[in-house]
Amino acid sequence: MNLSIVPISMADEELIAILVSSISKSMEFESILVRQLVSNIPGKYLNKSRGQYRSDGFLEILSSIGKEEGRILLGITELDLYHPGLNYVFGQAEPGGNAVISLCRLRQEFYGLEADQRLLIERATKEAAHEIGHVLGLSHCNFRSCVMFFSNSIVDTDRKSDRLCASCSKIVRSIVGFPLKQSF
């Protein structure tokens, strides 16, 4: 299985390179490619009163790029995302499709705290693994340390591991024969 990272309205190439390295250490992909930046976000995805973008719109953008067989597209953006019925999302995925994560609320600065790139990378890696888990067919897990545990807040993201629990890892292997690393 292969992964393509698609920066969406995000031009920080150094940060993308660090994320690629971190994701490759967390998950066993044959290859990780970085696609060309997508900078044209249709206005229909922006909710001006909220100052946020619909996450499903970003999945539509990824779908329009075209999916290669055996390759997951993971969009990464700095823009704040939401899904109808939720105040915000750290990311969203389509089972068997593509995924997107937002770095906006993963940054310490969002909460009025000093920037911490190490923590940002750790959080982004967890959210990438979580959304890729959904692409591969996993649901949310009740085990708080599993990367598939639903993050209702940044505290939940910080608490969980970047790895699958043994149960979720077994499910992934049975679904697609794709072994994400596990730590417990």
Image (cartoon, rainbow, N blue to C red):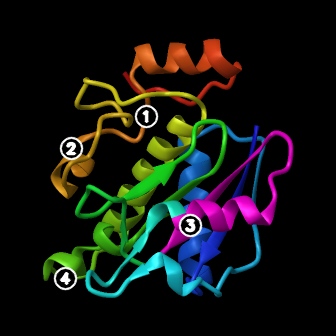
Give the label on residue 58, or none. Answer: 3
Q: Nearer the viewer, mark 1 or mark 3?
A: 3
The residue where tag 4 is placed is 114
Which numbered tag is attached to residue 128?
Answer: none
SS class, disc 1: loop
Location of the C terminus (image quadrant): top left
Element type where label 3 sits in the image: helix
Q: Earlier in the sequence, mark 3 or mark 2?
A: 3
Considering the image in quadrants, where does the N terminus appear?
A: top right
In the displayed orientation, state which residue is furthest to the front.
44
Rendered view: 77 above or below 55: below
Which of these two is toward me, 126 or 22?
126
The reply, left or right, for residue 115 in relation to residue 4 is left
Lower position in the chain sequence, tag 1 or tag 4: 4
Amino acid under disc 2: Arg
Residue matched to label 1 = 163
Q: Tell me how far mark 1 sits from mark 3, CA to CA.
A: 25 Å
Q: Is residue 162 magenta?
A: no
Image depth: mark 3 or mark 2 in front: 3
On screen, residue 172 above or below 62: above
